[in-house]
Image (tube, coloured by chain):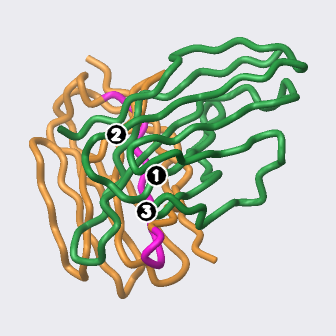
Chain colours: A orange, B green
Amino acid sequence: ELKVEQNPLFLSMQEGKNYTIYCNYSTTSDRLYWYRQDPGKSLESLFVLLSNGAVKQEGRLMASLDTKARLSTLHITAAVHDLSATYFCAGNTGTASKLTFGTGTRLQVTL
Amino acid sequence: DTEVTQTPKHLVMGMTNKKSLKCEQHMGHRAMYWYKQKAKKPPELMFVYSYEKLSINESVPSRFSPECPNSSLLNLHLHALQPEDSALYLCASSLQTVEYTDTQYFGPGTRLTVL
């Protein structure tokens, strides 16, 4: 059974700073996803990583995947307040796309 | 168009009521999902429909009854719920082919309160 862990659970950071969220998973995952969720809202797809060494970037967010270490990272560059949200990573196995979510990282960017 | 719609947005019901949640997508996706999310927790998978057939039931109590009338619609029928069933119920859909990334697109959710 796939287990997904994230750390930290909560991250308070100042605007302009850089930081990384870590996502570890227990067994082979076909794909690794990153989602964003604003309070009381739904989940927005950010990235999907398919293979070892994959790197995707969108604005101030960059996601990478190391399948050998079973580790994905979400790097935040020069954080801005608009990035405040909860970020989930999720893995899946099999064609049924059964997603297993990590615990989530609540990011708070302060002025 | 990557939109999944859900109705209603909010629902308050008593433990003896029967109600239904509705989800719709017009992206041609062949897999549809129901998730339950409690506050400050990740979403938990409840059901998966693949090509209009129930393919996964994550041991969900029978007071939750899913239905997929066609490839664009997904319903969740609720009956005799308990207060602990209060949560955000999220619907999602995905293309479901191995050639694609099969990203799941989520609807806005229904906030359910059981009194």
Question: In the rendered image, is residue B30 in sight?
Answer: yes
User: In the shown orientation, is residue A56 left or right of residue A47?
Assistant: left
> Pointer 1 and pointer 3: residues touching (CB < 8 Å)?
no
Q: Mark 2 points at which residue?
A: B25
Which label sits in the foreground, 2 or 3? 2
Badge 2 crowding class, 10 Å Cα cut-off, few under 14, some 14 to 19, many 20 or more, is many
- Give the number of the disc on residue A53: none
Residue type pointed to by label 2: Gln
Residue type pointed to by label 1: Met
Q: Position of residue B106 (x, y in %)?
A: 39, 40
Q: Name the residue under label 1.
A: B32
Q: Position of residue A90 (x, y in %)?
A: 44, 59
Q: Give, as a single range, the part of the protein colored magenta.
A: A84-96
Tags 1 and 2 on a common chain:
yes
Question: In the rendered image, is residue A12 in sight?
Answer: no
Parent chain of label 3:
A
Residue at 52 percent of width and 56 percent of height:
A101
Taking the view exactly as shown, the residue that stands out farthest to the bottom is A68
Query: What kind of element bears circle 3?
Result: strand
- Give the number of the disc on residue A23: 3
